Image (cartoon, rainbow, N blue to C red):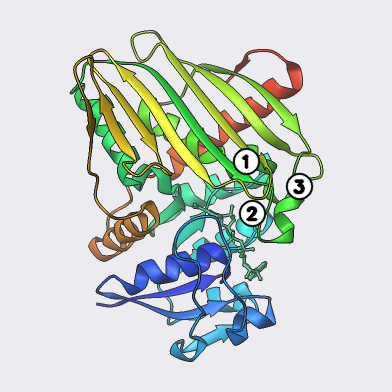
């Protein structure tokens, strides 16, 4: 059986997802939808902050091209709907795709509006199909390695973790600059690390955050620093920094420093040897699989669809917890206090 995919939104992420599907057997992207005529004509240039963005979409290879995502959802030939539109439009397309009994992959964050999140969670939990939010860091090789080290205690218990993700204010689409649409760096960029903290250690009991507003978006949190509070036996100190108010020539950065009892594991995406292990005796470069989180996430999604299994690695319930943590971070920035994750 070939899984037939329709992508809604052929911008940065739509194109990254398209190239991932095209590397996989047993799956075909048969359609896409985009409200922008230049995307439908295949004349728009590439954009994005990471990955091979410099290719034209070969529109002649699709069976159908729609100017409306809901029309794609109604296409009976499509098994899997992949939602890559601006964040404010996730909810309505997600609900429609779940109601049409499609398998659904929706880009992160679920939504900025808490009511939209609630509606998506309710629909996602009832779905009989495979439904997943695209929290790709769970699948990114350097982060897969860290998860393994935490779970197996290969270097002893993890004592502390610093996560850092910083982009420039030179974002590629105008909707990113409206906080009500993108959620600012807190909801759009930093959410990757929030989700990863949730994946690694589960739901923190509380968070304390400070933030800077409006450096890039109109009024969103464009720089955030969060401490996540866990029981001491889980991990002693976890901090994440997320920001996209660096100036335009800033190179995209993601990385972490994880201190275990017997070694420090460090990832810096911009270093010639991105993953390093430091002990008291030696500094060693660690090779990780030459792949990326987008490809691995889509491979996993297609595998779940093909095998008829719900995605254990990235459930709707877990994505809901991630949104609760981000919402607590936002409350903490406003209140200046430690906030419980409700
Ligand atoms: N997982 C990641 O690493 C990652 C990275 C970047 C963006 N994202 C997320 O992916 C989503 C898309 O971001 P992007 O950078 O690809 O944006 P983009 O602006 O590059 O692309 C969005 C595309 O959707 C189209 N579009 C807008 N509204 C539409 C609608 N209602 N119906 C159909 N098409 C519509 C636009 O014309 C555009 O082509 C966002 O939710 C963003 O947060 C995730």
> Does any portion of residue 265 appear in the rendered image?
yes
Q: Do the residues labelled 1 and 2 touch (CB within 8 Å)?
A: yes
| Label 1 vs 3, first from the N-terminus | 3
Residue 100, above or below 132: below
Marks counted in the figure total 3
Q: Examine the image and state in which quarter residue 142 appears.
A: top left
- According to the image, label 1 marks what residue? 187
Q: Residue 180 carries which label?
A: 3
x then y, percent, for residue 108: 53, 50
Q: Residues within 10 Å of mark 1 (few under 14, many from 20)?
A: many
- Queried on whether the Cβ of the residue with tag 1 lies below 8 angstroms from ligand 1, the answer reads no
Residue 42, above or below 11: below
| Label 1 vs 2, first from the N-terminus | 2
Where disc 2 sits, the SS reads helix
x then y, percent, for residue 48: 56, 60
Residue at 24% over, 28% down: 149
> Does any portion of residue 83 appear in the rendered image?
no
Q: Residue 87 carries which label?
A: 2
Residue closest to the eye, 52 or 339: 52
Q: Residues within 10 Å of mark 2 (few under 14, many from 20)?
A: many
Looking at the rendering, in which quadrant would you find the C terminus?
top right
């Amino acid at each position: 059986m070939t899984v037939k995919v329709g992508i809604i939104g052929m911008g940065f992420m739509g194109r990254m997802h398209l190239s991932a599907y095209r590397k996989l057997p047993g799956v075909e992207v048969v359609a896409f939808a985009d409200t922008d005529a230049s995307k439908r004509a295949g004349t728009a240039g590439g954009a994005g902050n990471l990955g091979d963005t410099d290719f034209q979409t070969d529109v002649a290879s699709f069976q159908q091209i729609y100017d409306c995502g809901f029309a794609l959802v109604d296409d009976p030939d499509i098994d899997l709907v992949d939602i890559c539109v601006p964040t404010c439009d996730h909810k309505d397309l997600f609900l429609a795709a779940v109601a049409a009994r499609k398998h659904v992959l929706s880009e992160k964050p679920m939504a900025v509006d808490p009511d939209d999140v609630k509606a998506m969670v309710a629909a996602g939990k009832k779905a009989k199909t495979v439904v997943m939010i695209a929290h790709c860091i769970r699948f990114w090789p350097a982060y897969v390695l860290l998860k393994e080290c935490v779970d197996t205690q290969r270097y002893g218990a993890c004592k502390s973790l610093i996560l850092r993700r910083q982009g420039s204010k030179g974002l590629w689409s105008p909707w990113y600059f409206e906080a009500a649409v993108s959620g600012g760096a807190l909801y759009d960029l930093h959410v990757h690390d929030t989700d990863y903290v949730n994946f690694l250690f589960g739901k923190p009991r509380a968070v304390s955050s400070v933030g800077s507003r409006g450096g890039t978006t109109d009024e969103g949190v464009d720089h955030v620093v969060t401490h996540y509070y866990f029981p001491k036996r889980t991990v002693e100190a976890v901090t994440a920094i997320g920001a996209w108010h660096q100036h335009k020539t800033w190179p995209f950065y993601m990385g972490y420093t994880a201190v275990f009892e017997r070694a420090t594991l460090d990832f810096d995406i911009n270093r010639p040897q991105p993953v390093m292990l430091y002990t008291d005796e030696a500094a060693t470069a660690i090779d990780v699989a030459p792949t990326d989180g987008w490809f691995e996430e889509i491979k996993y999604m297609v595998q779940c669809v093909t095998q008829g299994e719900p995605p254990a690695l990235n459930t709707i319930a877990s994505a809901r917890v991630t949104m609760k943590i981000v919402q607590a971070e936002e409350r903490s920035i406003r209140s200046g206090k430690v906030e419980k994750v409700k």
